[in-house]
């Protein structure tokens, strides 16, 4: 029984889990050990380790099931608090951005990135956003925003196409543990 209603996409509520299962399957098929974390307030989705090297990483999965932009790139929302993390606390944290295609059976597209690179790139992108304002106040989503409000509540989007154009490197599955 579909309780989502005629206008709702029932896939939207489960796309986060689908992305996590996709990442888990990719890790396991490559021989890495991996386990889910449970709960609604979790800060990491998957713990994974390479039994050959003994290295363990924490993985945060961000999933998008919307229609991709040009070049099969997309954007994902990330929390502002990520910018406050230290390099030490993110050294073993990997972000995997998954783009699902809910209306067809094609294989998901994914982007694997080091957290420090995601932080640097989203900060650069936010600075570009701020430079786009020439006056002291600007309307943002129907509300007047001052310069300070725009600095305090930045955009929280990761754009895969800008990550590459800013000179950052997406990782392969094997590079996660290097």
Image (cartoon, rainbow, N blue to C red):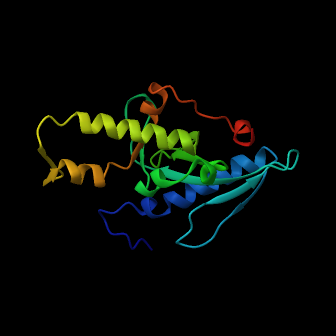
Toward the viewer: 13 or 39? 39
Residue 81 visible? The answer is yes
Residue 7, x across and y down, in percent: 29, 62
Tell me what residue is drawn at x 71 percent, y 36 percent: 175
Q: Is residue 26 above or below residue 69?
A: below
Tell me what residue is drawn at x 18 percent, y 52 percent: 141
Toward the viewer: 83 or 160? 83
Tell me what residue is drawn at x 44 percent, y 50 percent: 65
Residue 41, x across and y down, in percent: 53, 71
Q: Is residue 153 above or below residue 69?
A: below
How many labels, in total?
A: 0
Q: Quadrant of the N terminus?
A: bottom left
Tell me what residue is drawn at x 53 percent, y 72 percent: 40
Position of 169 compared to 75: left or right?
right
Q: Quadrant of the C terminus?
A: top right
Residue 106 visible? The answer is no
Residue 73, x across and y down, in percent: 44, 34
Question: In this view, which residue lies farthest toward the right?
Answer: 52
Residue 67, x across and y down, in percent: 39, 42
């Amino acid at each position: 029984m579909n309780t989502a209603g005629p206008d709702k996409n029932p896939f939207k509520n489960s796309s986060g889990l689908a992305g996590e299962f996709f990442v888990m399957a990719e890790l396991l098929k490559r021989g890495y050990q991996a386990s889910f974390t449970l709960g609604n307030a979790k800060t990491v989705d998957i713990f994974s380790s390479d039994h050959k090297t003994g290295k363990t990483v924490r993985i945060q999965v961000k999933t998008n099931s919307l229609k991709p932009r040009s070049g099969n790139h997309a954007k994902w929302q990330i929390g502002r608090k990520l910018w406050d993390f230290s390099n030490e606390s993110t050294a073993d944290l990997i972000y995997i951005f998954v783009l699902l295609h809910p209306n067809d059976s094609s294989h998901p597209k994914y982007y694997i990135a080091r957290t420090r690179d995601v932080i640097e790139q989203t900060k650069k992108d936010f600075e570009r956003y701020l430079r786009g304002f020439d006056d002291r106040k600007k309307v943002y989503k129907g509300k007047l925003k001052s310069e300070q409000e725009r600095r305090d509540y930045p955009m929280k989007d990761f754009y895969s196409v800008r990550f590459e154009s800013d000179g950052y490197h997406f990782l392969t599955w094997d590079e996660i543990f290097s």
